[in-house]
Image (cartoon, grey):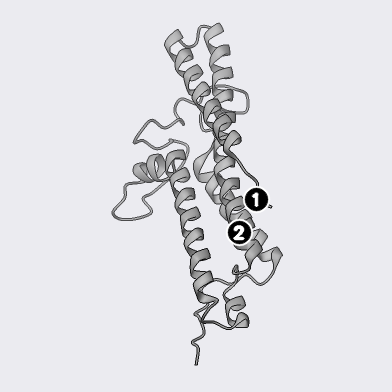
Amino acid sequence: MKQKPEKILRLKNTKHKAFFLTFILGLTLISVVGLRNLSLDNTLLAEAAPTRNSLPSDLSLPPIHPDEPAEYTFSERLSRTNALDSASKIGNALSSFRKLTAKAQTVLEPENLNEVGNTDWEIQNLGFPNWVNTVEGTIEKQNYQLKKLEWELAQKQYEAGEINRSVLDSKAESYETAKQNFQQFWQSLKITD
């Protein structure tokens, strides 16, 4: 007799799956990208802009784990680099799930396999790659947009004598790097259908 797989997370319909994916994407984007240095009137919020290993003064962020300082969580765990690395790991996990599903098809009845969820060919071969690309692409796009805004603000601040040339050059360099990263992502993007 075949053993029924344990149900960990089963999303019964497309509406639930879409909500779950939107929720995960939203959490990723909120944790990765934010216009933390700009206010609505384009003034620099120096006291709210965290430096490496510091927290913004306008937020109350206690540690979320006893072994991890809040500063590390904010600046490292929730960084763009870590988010892209995590998206890559999610893609690898989904690839493993695809392989496991192929092996499970030889030992489980179709109705039992369907109860696990996300085991059909379309989800695994079209959805999985597109979902990961969406998360990675959004992170790169928003990083590009953020760096562009920071550079445009720096130009105005430089013209007004509020910042020096080295700060302006640093913002221009960050913008160019973000632009190249997004352009490189775009050129490598393939929509699976």
Provide the residue designation for mark 1. Answer: 192
- Residue at screen point 63% across, 57% down: 127
Residue at 54%, 50% in the rendered image: 27
- Placement of 104 over or under 45, stated as above or below: below
Query: Callout 2, which amino acid?
Result: Asn
At 42% from the left and 44% from the top, the residue drawn is: 82
Q: For numbered disc 2, what is the local secondary structure?
A: helix
Percent x, y of residue 181: 52, 31
- Mark 2–mark 1 distance (CA, rounded to whole Å): 8 Å
Is there a contact, CB below 8 Å, between mark 2 and mark 1?
yes
The three-letter code of the residue at mark 1 reads: Thr
Q: Residue placed farthest to the bottom in the image?
A: 1
Mark 1 element type: loop
Residue 131 position, x and y percent, is 60, 52
Q: Residue at x 56, y 13 (%)?
A: 155
Which sits in the foreground, 102 or 56?
102
Residue found at the far left of this picture = 67
Q: How busy is the neighbourhood of tag 2: few (under 14 within 10 Å), some, or many (20 plus)? A: some
Residue with the mark numbered 2 = 125
116 to 75, vertically: above or below: below
